[in-house]
Image (cartoon, grey):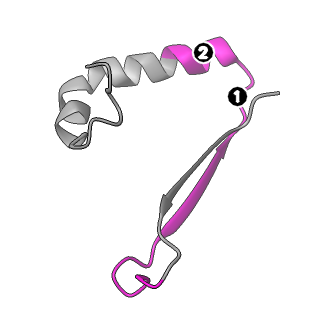
Amino acid sequence: MNIYIDESGSINNTLDKNSDFIITLVVPTNKKKLEYTYKRFVSNNYKILKKLDKTNKMFFNN
C-alpha cells in the first residue's frame, strides 16, 4: 500500500501571519491512474508551475 502525505502551512510562532495548516493523505486504489493524472496535471500547468517555482525545487533538472 502506498500512502502519499503532504503538508502546507506553518505551526510555529508565525501563526498570526498564517493561520492555515493543512495535511493531505492520498491512498490511491489505482497507482497507474494516479501517475497518469499527476503527469497530465503537470503537463497542462507546466508554465504556471515553472513560474511559481522560484527556488527551482519542483523542476531542479529544468
Residue at mark 1: 28
* Local secondary structure at mark 1: loop
Residue at mark 2: 33
Q: Residues within 10 Å of mark 2 (few under 14, many from 20)?
A: few
Q: Using residue 55 as the reference point, say whether residue 11 is left or right of it.
A: right
* Local secondary structure at mark 2: helix
Q: Where, by quadrant of the figure, is residue 52 drawn?
A: top left
Disc sitting over residue 52 in the figure = none
Looking at the rendered image, the quarter that the C terminus falls into is top left
Number of residue marks: 2
**Is residue 26 highlighted in magenta?**
yes
Looking at the rendered image, the quarter that the N terminus falls into is top right
Q: Does 60 sit above or below residue 25? A: above
In the image, which residues are magenta? 13-36
Q: Position of residue 58 (x, y in %)?
A: 35, 33
Label 2–label 1 contact, CB within 8 A: yes
Residue drawn at x 46%, y 72% as measured from the top left: 20
